[in-house]
Amino acid sequence: MIERWLPAAASDHAGALDGVLLSVHVHMALIFVLWLAVFVIALIKFRGGAHPVATQAGVRGWWPAIAIGLVMVGDVILLTTQALPAWAARNEPPPAGVEPVEVRVTAEQFAWNIHYPGADRRFGRTQPALVSAANPLGIDRRDPAAADDVGVQHVLMLPVNRTAVIQLTSRDVIHSFTLNEMRVKQDATPGMTARVWFTPIARGDWEIACSQLCGLGHYRMRGEYHVVDQAAWERWLAEQR
Ligand SMILES: [Cu+2]
């Protein structure tokens, strides 16, 4: 129902998060309508014409407590049945038994540097001293594990229906790695590596956004991400090497 106002839901957990969003909005809409009704009733009932002298006593009764109690009950139901389970599922490690695609993403002002480990599934050594325009990740090609590694800027390529694990960090300030269609948003913090995982379930071409105001060039800190077939993904990786 809420999907029509949202970007495409293209990961397997997107439905759960959209469900939380919908429930929160329904909850807030109900509260808004009821408070508005109380407000309008109060405006009419306690208008100056009917009450020339103000009373300091206020309104007595159980209704205010019942109303606030109902809101709290609604909040607790929402938290325990939807929000906390969805959050807990995101914090679990990726499901055992599946072979995830692991990618490192290093944010910087104002770029996304993306490191693929290649066919050996091992990330080669990186060294800050080797960082240059041609090698933004500083991949050390003398390391055998780095021989088939791929380092690119701004292009995240993922195979469909395979869990992707992103190891995310930043080289300078805090950025926020955002894949709207995957319902993924994670801060990239210098000195820390955050792990975020998801499973794309639909093919498509979308945009990586930075959703943390990170400097003057924040607006142009965009990348692209593509979810493609396994074969197309392997072909693309081979082409990059
Ligand atoms: Cu940024």
Image: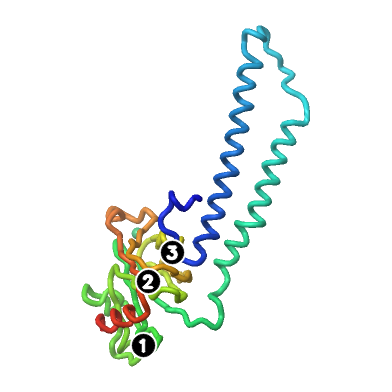
Image-quadrant location for residue 156: bottom left
| Label 2 element class | strand
In which of the image's four quarters is ligand 1 placed? bottom left
Q: Are marks 1 and 2 in contact (CB under 8 Å)?
A: no
Q: Residue furthest bottom?
A: 144
Q: Which mark is residue 119?
A: 1
Residue at the (66%, 7%) spot, across then down: 52
Residue that badge 3 annotates: 10
Q: Is residue 19 left or right of residue 61?
A: left
Q: Is residue 211 above or below residue 148?
A: above
In percent of width and height, residue 152 lies at: 28, 74
Q: Nearer the viewer, mark 3 or mark 1?
A: 3
Vertical relation: 203 (above or below) 95: above
Nearer-the-camera pick, 234 or 79: 234
Three-letter code, disc 2: Val
Question: Label 2 neighbourhood size at 10 Å, few (<14), some (14-19), many (20+)?
Answer: many
The residue that label 2 is drawn on is 105
Element at badge 3?
Answer: loop
**SS type, badge 1:** loop
Where is 117 relative to 173, above or below?
A: below
Identified by mark 3, the residue type is Ala
Q: For the point 48% across and 69% down, which residue is it?
A: 198
Res 34 quadrant in image: top right
Residue at screen point 32% across, 67% down: 112
Q: Quadrant of the C terminus?
A: bottom left
